[in-house]
Image: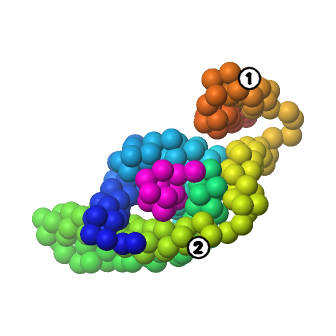
């Protein structure tokens, strides 16, 4: 199952995922690490953009309001998105199906505690770099600070890289078991993917403490329901739902001001 080509793909995926993950807190923060971007990007790299879009859009709805602010360590949505996309694509010979996408989402959700623990450990480790950097004086302090920053970035990259090399092969091996499950379980996973946007939208509404009906979110659902069947593109439902939710969030944020 893991021949030389697969091993090369896994390592390449881990490197790409590690670079994307730096955008969360370590470097840039250009929002490339957000699921809605990381999913399609990783899907494109692996040759199945549609699977990446479905997974990225679904997980964006779930974690769009969880931000790594201060000491709060949210679920690492980037690792979940990249892992789920890679597992769904590589676990089914380069093409993710709805049942496999659903199972991959469920599987990577179960991995969240592991990624959160890793993030917490790395954050605590990097917090000690200041003690090292502040031990010098003058120009020496500047050099030590620069080295501390570079070392911290390297540690963040290696954390994601190692997690990918562990989680993705486990996920691919689990897909082999899932494919042997009865057909009704596969249908249930397909249904799970279709309902996932509803769960994400409900979480957005709850986290924003919206007390009245969100007309923007309703408009997103109605538009998606109309455009989806017309263009025969199920992904339109996910994209329009996200647009509706984000417009609603922005609307209520401006109202609060």
Residue at 48% over, 62% down = 91
Q: Is residue 153 magenta?
A: no
Residue occupied by mark 2: 177
Write down the quadrant of residue 243 in the picture: top right
- In the drawing, does residue 104 fall left or right of residue 91? right
Badge 1 element: helix
- In the drawing, does residue 134 fall left or right of residue 180? left
Residue at 69% over, 59% down = 186
In the rendered view, tell whether residue 97 sits above or below residue 120.
above
In the rendered view, tell whether residue 8 sits above or below residue 52.
below
Start and end of the magenta stretch? Answer: 82-97
Q: Quadrant of the N terminus?
A: bottom left
Q: Residue lying furthest right in this view?
A: 212
Q: Position of residue 198 (x, y in %)?
A: 75, 45
> Which numbered disc, 1 or 2, marks the residue that appears first in the sequence?
2
- In the drawing, does residue 187 fall left or right of residue 20? right
């Amino acid at each position: 199952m893991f021949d030389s080509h697969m091993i090369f793909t896994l390592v390449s995926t881990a490197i790409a995922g590690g670079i994307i993950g730096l955008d969360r807190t370590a470097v840039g923060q250009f929002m490339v690490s957000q699921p809605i971007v990381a999913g399609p990007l990783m899907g494109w790299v692996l040759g199945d953009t549609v699977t990446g879009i479905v997974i990225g859009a679904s997980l964006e709805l779930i974690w769009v309001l969880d931000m790594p602010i201060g000491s709060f360590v949210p679920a690492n949505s980037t690792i979940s998105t990249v892992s789920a996309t890679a597992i769904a694509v590589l676990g089914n010979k380069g093409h993710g199906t709805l049942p496999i996408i659903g199972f991959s989402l469920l599987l990577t959700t179960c991995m969240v505690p592991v990624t959160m623990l890793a993030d917490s450990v790395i954050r605590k480790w990097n917090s000690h770099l200041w003690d090292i950097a502040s031990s010098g004086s003058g120009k020496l302090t500047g050099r030590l600070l620069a080295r501390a920053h570079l070392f911290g970035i390297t540690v963040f990259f290696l954390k994601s890289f190692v997690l990918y090399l562990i989680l993705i092969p486990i996920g691919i091996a689990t897909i082999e078991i899932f494919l042997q499950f009865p057909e009704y379980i596969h249908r249930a996973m397909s249904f799970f993917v279709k309902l996932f946007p509803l769960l994400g939208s409900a979480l957005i509404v709850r986290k924003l403490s919206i007390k009245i009906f969100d007309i923007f979110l309703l408009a997103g659902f109605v538009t998606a329901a109309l455009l989806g069947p017309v263009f025969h593109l199920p992904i339109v439902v996910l994209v329009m739902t996200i647009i509706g939710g984000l417009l609603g969030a922005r609307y209520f944020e401006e109202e609060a001001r």
